[in-house]
Image (cartoon, helix red, strand yellow):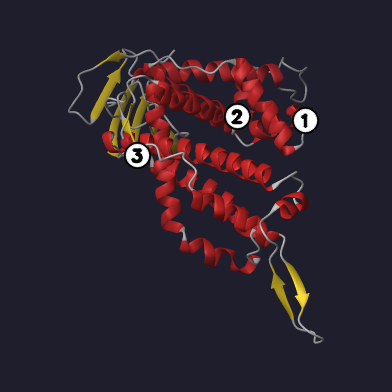
């Protein structure tokens, strides 16, 4: 309905399009990842929209002296003038911005903010809005990243520290002489300690400790490698990100961090004071996450990495077990909070990072 024929672009930061019916779209870059949109909807389209809306009101109108849907159009127009006008502006705004997004190939990351929506004396409609869009950047080479994973070898010192920690956990407070004073007595690291901990011997306990240390080192190594790849991708791809997208991510991080502080025993009246100490870290962390999300999405598109329905269902079941709720309840909550698309994005990013880790061209440095 709002079809456009492209017009000459005036400069690198302005784009315009127009249609024979007089509808015009002008898009300008106003800030990093922000566009301003000005539209003028021609009278021909406005009249057509108004006529359709008026007929819809007539079908539903139940005015005195007339059966429902049988009142004269001019009477309905006068009776519901304000409501018809509001619906006309709402519908025209929605359709025009939707068409502008398509015609100008905008990629919004948040809803349009409409600053002006008015019906002019000539019967045209003028709209002015701003919207945050995806950053424009050329994806740099992402294969062949050199990484240096930390050693996964268990040292004697690490083994001894782990055993000493277990020894400490089994310490007893024993009285000194006949007084009330007590001192801590550490058990010997021997077969008896092992048996007290549920193992047959010190050898078996030591093997268990080493297995746990290796498991932790593998997890730490994987995390370090993932961070190293992410750091390199950020170094290679420098671009601005939508500020409001970062702000929303900061709020999510604040909520998570606030919960961790509460669970750690911080008094509720001290929460804001503690949070303020980490405000810059939360901001930089949010910017990092938002930038990486765009980079991983670009790589996923390049490599045709997708998320199957089975993978989404598996993640839903995983969340339901973790939250101890039915999958339907979890899905309803995620939908209500607008978080279901984030589940898709998270899985896709995880698969993209796994792709980079498993790619043969990813090099390991000594």
Q: Position of residue 5 (x, y in %)?
A: 29, 12
202 or 140, nearer to the observer? 202
Q: Residue at x 58, y 20 (%)?
A: 53
Q: Which residue is mark 3?
A: 231
Give neighbour class at mark 3: few <14, some 14-19, many 20+ (Cα, 10 Å): few
40 or 347, nearer to the observer? 347
**Secondary structure found at label 1:** loop
Q: Which residue occupies the extreme bottom position in the image? A: 179
Mark whose residue sits in front, 2 or 3: 3
Is 87 on the left-hand or right-hand side of 179? Answer: left
Q: Position of residue 363 (x, y in %)?
A: 32, 27
Q: Which residue is mark 2?
A: 340
Would you place residue 121 above or below residue 268 in this image? Answer: above
**Secondary structure found at label 3:** helix
Which quadrant holds the C terminus? Answer: top left
Q: Position of residue 43 (x, y in %)?
A: 40, 20
261 or 75, nearer to the observer? 261
Distance in Å between CA atoms under marks 2 and 1: 16 Å
């Amino acid at each position: 309905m709002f079809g456009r024929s492209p017009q000459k672009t005036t400069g690198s930061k302005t784009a315009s399009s127009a249609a024979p019916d007089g509808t015009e779209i002008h898009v300008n870059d106003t800030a990093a990842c922000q566009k301003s949109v000005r539209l003028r909807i021609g009278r021909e389209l406005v009249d057509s929209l108004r006529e359709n809306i008026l007929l819809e009101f007539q079908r539903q109108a139940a005015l005195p002296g007339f059966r429902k849907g049988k009142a004269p159009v001019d009477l309905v127009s006068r009776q519901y003038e304000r409501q018809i006008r509001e619906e006309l502006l709402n519908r025209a705004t929605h359709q025009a911005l939707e068409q502008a997004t398509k015609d100008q190939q905008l990629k919004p990351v948040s809803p349009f903010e409409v600053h002006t929506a008015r019906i002019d004396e000539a019967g045209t409609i003028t709209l002015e809005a701003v919207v945050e869009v995806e950053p424009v950047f050329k994806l740099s080479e992402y294969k062949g990243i050199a990484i240096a994973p930390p050693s996964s070898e268990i040292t004697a010192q690490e083994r001894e520290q782990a055993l000493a920690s277990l020894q400490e956990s089994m310490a007893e407070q024993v009285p000194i002489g006949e007084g009330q004073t007590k001192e801590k007595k550490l058990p010997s690291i021997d077969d008896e300690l092992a048996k007290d901990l549920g193992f047959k011997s010190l050898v078996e306990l030591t093997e268990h400790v080493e297995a746990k240390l290796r498991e932790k080192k593998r997890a730490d190594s994987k995390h370090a490698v993932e961070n190293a790849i992410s750091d390199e991708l950020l170094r290679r791809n420098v671009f601005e990100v939508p500020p409001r997208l970062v702000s929303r991510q900061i709020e999510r991080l604040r909520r998570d961090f606030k919960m961790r502080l509460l669970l750690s025993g911080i008094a509720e009246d001290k929460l804001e004071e503690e949070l303020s100490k980490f405000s810059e870290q939360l901001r930089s962390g949010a910017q990092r996450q938002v930038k990486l999300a765009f980079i991983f999405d670009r790589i996923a598109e390049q490599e045709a990495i997708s998320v199957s329905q089975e993978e989404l269902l598996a993640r839903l079941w995983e969340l339901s077990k973790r939250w101890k709720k039915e999958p339907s309840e979890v899905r309803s909550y995620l939908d209500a909070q607008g978080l279901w698309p984030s589940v898709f994005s998270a899985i896709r990013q995880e698969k993209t990072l796994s792709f980079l880790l498993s790619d043969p061209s990813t090099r390991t440095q000594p």
